[in-house]
Amino acid sequence: MMPKWDMNKIRFKWFSIQKSIEQKISWTSEEDDKLSEIIKRRQLTKDEASIYKWTEIAEELNKSENEKNSTRLGKHCRERWFNHLDHTFKKYL
């Protein structure tokens, strides 16, 4: 069953994708710190299945970084975490 989307969610998603396609915005150290803080807080308080719900993490990051005028998608947050911030994740054996 498909989840019900209201027009505000659809509009937000559409503009987020368009904005991310139009301009590549580099991650700031403040965003990195905030993303790490969100992940660590979720690791302490959430069950294992909901720690890495990247859409929720992106929404929380966007709320806190609202004045920067940058919008991060869940995919951006996931890639940033695993490729740059999570030092326990091993890419190569």
Image: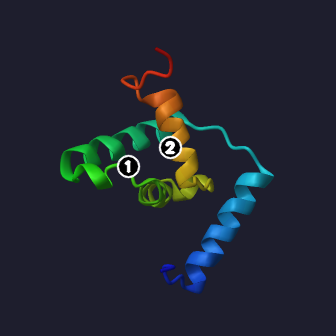
Direction from residue 83 to residue 12 in the image, left or right: right
In the picture as drawn, the residue positioned furthest to the right comes out as 22
**Depth check, front residue: 62 or 7:** 7
Q: Quadrant of residue 57?
A: bottom left
Number of other residues with Cα within 10 Å of mark 2, as a class: few under 14, some 14 to 19, many 20 or more? some
Q: Is residue 72 above or below residue 32?
A: below
Q: Residue at x 36, y 24 (%)?
A: 88
Q: Earlier in the sequence, mark 1 or mark 2?
A: 1
The image quadrant of residue 39 is top left
Give the secondary structure at mark 1: loop
Amino acid under label 1? Tyr
Front-lying residue, 89 or 15: 89
Q: Is residue 26 above or below residue 83?
A: below
Residue 75 disc label: none
Residue 44 in percent (x, y) is at 20, 45
Identify residue for label 1: 52
Name above or below for residue 90 compared with residue 22.
Answer: above
Which label was assigned to residue 78?
2
Mark 1 closeness class: few <14, some 14–19, many ≥20 residues within 10 Å: some
Could you tell me which residue is drawn at 41 percent across and 43 percent down? Answer: 34
- Where residue 11 sits: x, y (%)? 65, 76
In the picture shown, does residue 17 fall above or below 33?
A: below
Query: Residue sitting at 57 percent across and 55 percent down?
Result: 73
* Circle 1/circle 2 CB separation < 8 Å: yes
C-alpha distance separating marks 1 and 2: 8 Å
Residue drawn at x 65%, y 62% as measured from the top left: 16
Q: Secondary structure at mark 2?
A: helix
* Three-letter residue code for mark 2: Arg
